[in-house]
Structures are given as structure tokens and as C-alpha cells.
Image (cartoon, rainbow, N blue to C red):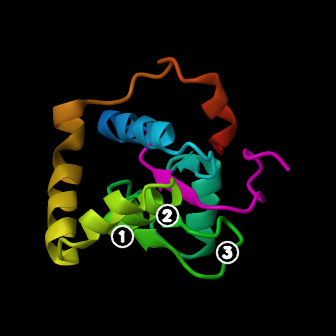
Amino acid sequence: MSPSDPNHPGPILFYDGECGLCQRLIRRLLALDQRGGLRLAPLQGPTAQAWLRERGLPTKDFQSLIFLPEGLRGRCGHLRKTDGVIAALHASGHPRMARYLRLVPRKVRDTGYQFVARLRHSVFGAWKTGQPMRPEWKSRFLA
């Protein structure tokens, strides 16, 4: 089973695929994930859209990332905003960074997250498709 197979077990991070800041941060997270266990999918793509519809969640709200610790078939739920960031850092093999972020109260973290989410497109712009990606990362993306 390939990492790009939606049924592949393991964590998945849904993110805003049209956001320049989000794309830069995703690439940084991929560089940190030396084990290669984290998979990613844009919120606008068919995998994330189907998952959102199945759970009755908004399909047009791209201001929050969603982390699925057990992948698409997991039963333990999902994490959003900074809880998702912390879990993604932990899953990518960087629990120390995750612990530092967890020291900040969730309300403070999420307020900062929402502030950046509102401004990210105007400050960082849209992602320009066609920008090169490391070949070894391509199999970790779901549609």
C-alpha cells in the first residue's frame, strides 16, 4: 500500500492548498519529517472534501487545518488549529517543539492562529502552482 493511498494507515494533515504561507509551512514540516510518516491533502481536494462531507463539517472553511492522527479510517477523531499543529509536529518526529507550543495556553495559541489565518492571503499571497517539490515528497500527498 503506497503512502498516497487514502487507506494507508497513519496521520494525515488537511491544509489550505491555495495559501502561500500554508504551502511554505507544509514544505517545512515535510523537511522535518525524516521518518516520512505524515501524509498531506489540501482542504480543497477530493480526499478532504469527502471526509468533511461525511462528517457534516463545513466544506468551504479553509481557515483551519485538520489533523487526523489515525488517518481517514481512524476512530479517535480529529484536531484543529494549534492542537493540530502540535500533533503534526509530534507525528513528524519533533515532540520537543510540540511540547514548547503546548506550554502556551490553547486560547492564546488559537487566538494567534486565527489572527494569522485572517491575514495570511493578503500578506503571503496565493500559492503559485508549479513550484518545484522534492520528488520524494510527492507520494505523501493525497488528492
CA gap between label 1 and label 2 equals 8 Å
Residue 74 - label:
3
Q: Which residues are magenta?
A: 1-17
The disc labelled 1 sits on which kind of residue?
Asp
Mark 3 / mark 2, whichever is N-terminal = 2
The disc labelled 2 sits on which kind of residue?
Phe
CA gap between label 1 and label 3 equals 17 Å
Location of residue 125 in the rendering, given as x and y in whole percent from the top left corner: 26, 30
Location of residue 60 in the rendering, given as x and y in whole percent from the top left corner: 42, 57
Residue 27 - label:
none
The disc labelled 3 sits on which kind of residue?
Gly
Residue that label 2 marks = 67
Residue that label 1 marks = 83
Tell me the residue at 56%/48% (across/down).
40
Predominant secondary structure in magenta?
loop
Mark 1 / mark 3, whichever is N-terminal = 3
- Is 126 rendered above or below residue 90? above
Q: For mark 1, does the 10 Å Cα neighbourhood hold few (<14), some (14 to 19), or many (20 or more) residues?
A: many
Helix, strand or loop status at disc 2: strand
Location of residue 37 in the rendering, given as x and y in whole percent from the top left corner: 63, 52
Helix, strand or loop status at disc 3: loop
Residues at circles 3 and 2 in contact by the CB criterion of under 8 Å: no
- Is 128 rendered above or below residue 81? above
